[in-house]
Image (spheres, rainbow, N blue to C red):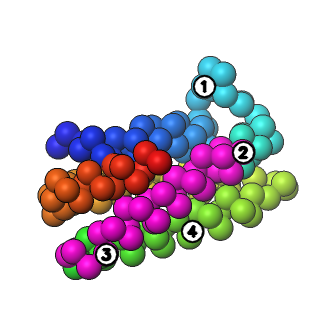
């Protein structure tokens, strides 16, 4: 299903976050222009979260989820899962250790982030597009653009 124009900005942000997810996994290949050692990956992940992902999560919750609340029980259930995923990811990013467990923790973040994004792209966004009318999708797009 082609992504609705109103959600395209979130999908583009997902692309960058998927690259981060892959970078953080154990045995990740070296990505040109991105950190290669664990400490630098941890620093990069923290910075990316602070400057990009935190706002992305907030936009999804403040705009998308707030506007769709009560439209459909399946959407409400999925929205609750998205919010729970965000809480888990916030906690994971906030507790990046500086010790021997760093590789395991980064791998956990990478896998959780990838699963979350896949859920949104493959299940949540298609359901939004199916159940929300054009007017509501346009309102979401406008709110995300400001």
Q: Position of residue 122 (x, y in %)?
A: 28, 52
Q: Which residue is tagged 1?
A: 31
Q: Which residue is tagged 3?
A: 69
Residue count near mark 2 (Cα–Cα under 10 Å), binned few <14, some 14–19, many ≥20:
few
Predominant SS along the magenta part: helix
Residue 129 located left or right of residue 78: left
Q: Position of residue 79 (x, y in %)?
A: 36, 70
Q: CA distance from mark 2 to mark 1?
A: 17 Å
Q: CA distance from mark 3 to mark 2?
A: 31 Å
The image shows residue 136, relative to residue 121, as above or below, that is below
Residue drawn at x 75%, y 53% as measured from the top left = 102
The image shows residue 18, relative to residue 102, as above or below, that is above
Could one spot residue 122 in this view of the protein?
A: no
Q: Which residue is tagged 2?
A: 47
Q: Position of residue 111 (x, y in %)?
A: 52, 53
What segment is highlighted magenta in the picture?
Answer: 47-72
Specify which label sits upstream in the sequence, 4 or 1: 1
Specify which label sits upstream in the sequence, 1 or 3: 1
Whether residue 51 appears in magenta in the rendering, the answer is yes
Q: Quadrant of residue 2?
A: top left
Helix, strand or loop under label 1? loop
Q: Which residue is tagged 4?
A: 88
């Amino acid at each position: 299903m082609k992504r609705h124009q109103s959600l395209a900005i979130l999908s583009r942000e997902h692309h960058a976050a998927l690259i981060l997810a892959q970078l953080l996994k154990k045995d990740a290949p070296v990505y040109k222009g991105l950190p290669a050692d664990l400490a630098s990956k941890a620093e990069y992940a923290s910075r990316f979260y602070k400057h990009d992902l935190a706002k992305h999560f907030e936009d999804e919750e403040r705009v998308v989820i707030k506007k769709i609340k009560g439209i459909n029980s399946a959407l409400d259930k999925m929205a609750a899962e998205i919010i729970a995923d965000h809480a888990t990811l916030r906690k994971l990013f906030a507790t990046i250790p500086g010790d021997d467990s760093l590789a395991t923790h980064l791998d956990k973040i990478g896998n959780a982030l990838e699963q979350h994004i896949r859920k949104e792209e493959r299940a949540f966004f298609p359901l939004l597009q199916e159940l929300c009318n054009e007017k509501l999708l346009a309102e979401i797009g406008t709110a995300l653009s400001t």
